[in-house]
Amino acid sequence: MKKLRILQVNKLYHPWIGGIESVAKTTAENLNDDTDMTVLVCQPKGKGVREQVNGVNVVRAGSLGIKFSMPISFSFPFLVRKYSKNTDVIILHEPFPLGDMAVLISGFRGKVILWWHSDIIKQKNLVKLINPIISKILKRADAIFTTSEGYIEGSAYIREYKEKCRIVPYGIDIDSYPVTPSQPILTDRLTDKGRKKLLFVGRLVYYKGVGVLLDAFKRVSGAELFIVGKGADEEALRAHAEQLGDRVHFIPPLSDEELKNAFADCDIFVLPSIEKSEAFGIVQLEAMICGKPVINTDLKTSVPLVSIDGETGLTVKAGDSEEMASAINRLIEDNSLRERFGKNAKRRVLEHFDIKIMTENIKNQCKKIMEE
């Protein structure tokens, strides 16, 4: 039987760190054996290249750099036209206006699946210019993948196209996460070995809410905070954290193995995001599979549907540093509650967010879409 030919289109790809890039990589690698998979993305900056990454064919268009969270690439539309000629299905990761335009003008007549990860929130002036393109790609789409019914209702874009939406929750490779850390990567950095370890992992950008977390941490005792990542707000956040002294540790992005050890080594994981740009939070799953309780926020996205308030962790009001501090202190002080939430968290990932479940879901959805 002839393999389904899939072209995944996204802004960037591994080793670039990001939630959407992680989903694109996981999808490509887990579907690679059963499909004819090609990934088409841009370089963050530099000349184009074609290569294999963990056995996946990856084409990177040349780029002048990134502006307004989008690569500037003049060759990208031509490459979409070229590689879509021998494709059955395009999976286009959103938001990506350059990709939208490229697919629309490519002449491609096969099936188009939009994987809707997030609405565009911050660039409000830019949105006015690109909304007509987004509207056209939504009408063109044969199906829209999203993570939950709740996100459909909370999205300003896809709720109008509810009949096209297919629920595809993210998944992780659960077997690759350690039960106990082989490297005590956080413990080794503790100033006071008697303190609990609070972990944040993500880009240091406005919508992640790290500033709110630092404000909350002023009211927390008995813990040290580990912030893993980099981004445009790093310098300002470091200045913000100076008054907290040796209780806050900034750590540059870690390798996959080091990061998994960090999840296994923490006591509490926190995702303090404040905007709907945070649509899911895969890092929650990574902490949960290691048996860690999660503190997240009540965004109108899938975030609070991943880690459940009162079951696998605590959910607080987005942007509320006092409520965040109260939740942190509660988990620091209550060992049995941390343990119970952690056990529930691991069980939830095993039952609902295994990469095998996600892969089968995608395969089944693609099959249905091709038959329609």
Image: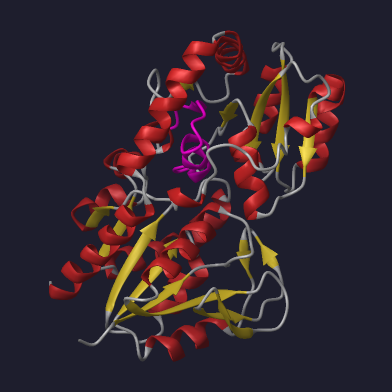
Which quadrant: the N terminus? bottom left
Left-right relation of 194 to 86 = right
Residue in front for this viewpoint, 4 or 370: 4
Measuring from the top left, give residue 188's x and y in whole percent: 79, 33
Q: Check if residue 282 falls in the magenta segment.
A: yes
Residue under the image location 33 percent in, 78 percent down: 35
Q: Which residues are magenta?
A: 279-300
Within the magenta stretch, is there residue 232? no
Residue under the point 51% across and 78% down: 55
Q: Is residue 251 visible?
A: yes
Residue 265 location in percent, x, y? 64, 33
Residue 79, compared with residue 367, is above or below; it is below
Figure colour scheme: secondary structure
Q: Is residue 300 visible?
A: no
Where is residue 88 shown, x and y percent of the image? 29, 82
Judged left or right of residue 108, residue 265 is right
The residue most toward the left is: 372
The residue under the point 37% across, 21% down is 311
Q: Residue at x 43, y 73 (%)?
A: 8
Quadrant in which the C terminus appears: bottom left
Picture layout, residue 325 above or below residue 234: above
The image position of residue 160, as x and y in percent, is: 26, 50
